[in-house]
Amino acid sequence: MMLLEAAMRGSNFKYLVYQGLNSAWHNRVMSFASFCILMVSLLMVGFTTLVTQNIDIIVGNIEDKNQTTIFMNEEATEEDVAAAKELLENDENIGEVLYIDKEQALSEMIDKVGSNAATLFEGLEGENIMPDTFQVRIIDITKMDETISRINKIDNLDLVKAPENFADSLIGIKRTMRVIGFAVVVALVTVCLVIISNTTRASIFARRREINIMKYVGATNSFIRIPFFVEGMFIGLLSAVTAWLLTWLGYNSLFELFNDGEVSWSIMGVTNIIPFDEVRLKVLLGYAVIGMGIGAFGSVLSLKKHMKV
Amino acid sequence: MIEFKDVSFTYSNGVDALNNINLRINDGEFAFIVGNSGAGKSTVVKLLLREVAATSGSVFVNGYNLKKIRKSQVPKLRRTIGVVFQDFRLIPSMTVYDNVAFVLRVIDAPRRYIRKRVPYVINLVGLREKARSYPSELSGGEQQRVALARALANDPALIIADEPTGNIDPELSYEIVDLLKEINRCGTTVIMVTHEHELVRYFGGRIINLTAGGIAFDDVIGGSDERK
């Protein structure tokens, strides 16, 4: 005993890793099943995340194009207009402020109505009925109501025309997409965990005698767990890399489609799609962490029952 | 050394397996534990391996107080014990050599030690020629010898043989006990649990007879010369 104890050394990690890989190969049918399930799930998680992020960007682009028009009333003096301009420019949630004075507004209106201008402005010669106007862009449309209440405090204000319904719709779309994306990811991860745990149960069942003997001869729990951990992580890693390559191919094909010069996707707001090169490392890392995590955790989950000796 | 002090054990279904047992087995002893089914033999083995903990009383094995032992210490306790089971419990996908080496790998023994120790114990049980065979290619007696070699691999202070002759021919049973006796002569404590009274009568020695969870008899008897 003394001789053996003296000869003891640190964890025989290489042996355990070999055992894990060997087990994955021995149970190759089950390993392949786990690999396929995990890979498809990772693909779905990846695409859901990428689509959600792109929709976020597209909605963001549309948001950026929002325009609120502020009309001053007839009594507004030059001082009122200057004060309004200052208030708008200093508001933290207002981006660009464009001031259109009465004359400019009138000439724009005349330009718009064209040949019918003479009929329209008949009897109003020398009189300008157009108001002083501001066109502003709201930065964060979720805070549109608060911003409009601040605008409403301007003296001699006539009317504020804000795209409130449009803002509500965009906020709704964004929120729904995030919830759907999150739900899909959670559901897939859960399903994966259950399936991997079940498939590895077969491999554990095949090795239950080995586990039982290990316990009787004094193996620590970690010694027993490591090969299963390695097996699960290996399958997870393989699935992650394969899913990543498929995502790369699939996403790039879609990217090329949306960036096709002949089709004007930008009209529909589909601009600034994230190029895969920009996110490829993040996607690989995400896939690897989720894949290996599910693989390892799923394997160990099934082990618990067999460890009680 | 093994000591049971006022040990009782009741299973979760309410069955009383052991009632107030007091027992001491010194280092280097050979003891037979005999008794009919349900007498508590298996429970004694389970207690020695700390598979279960005594409901009351204290169990001491190789310097460990099993009442106070931490979970993390249990593997260390088990490394001081070699176990032989009735059903051999060999790994079918491993050769004789690997089945024995497996124990040493489990306890993190260095490769050099494994390469020296495994052929030594395989030789000790007389299976040098079968080192590359798989369990399915061996007879019951040979498989039990492999199990014995595996129990010896980490040079334990105590060997527990739980019905080691239960699954083999009566003639081969004597060989297995001969081997255990030989191991005992080298200083290892051996506890053999069995219900084969002829075998016990033949070899003699210390006999602990369990009946209905209590010790009915604990004494040394002389062996006979007659093999059945």
Image (cartoon, coloured by chain):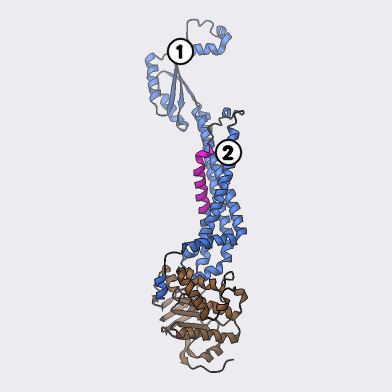
Q: Which residue is mark 2?
A: A252
What colour has chain A? blue
- Name the one closer to the observer, B51 or B170: B170
Q: Are marks 2 and 1 in contact (CB under 8 Å)?
A: no
Majority secondary structure of the magenta segment?
helix
How far separated are the C-alphas under marks 2 and 1?
51 Å
Q: Position of residue A187 (x, y in %)?
A: 55, 49
Q: Give amino acid for label 1.
A: Lys
Name the residue: 58% across, 27% down. Answer: A267
Q: Position of residue A161 (x, y in %)?
A: 49, 23
Quarter of the image where the N terminus of chain B is located: bottom left
Residue A184 magenta-highlighted: no
Q: Position of residue B200 (x, y in %)?
A: 53, 89
Mark 2, secondary structure of its residue:
helix
Q: Which residue is mark 1?
A: A102
Name the residue: 46% across, 13% down. Answer: A102
Image: magenta residue range: A273-292
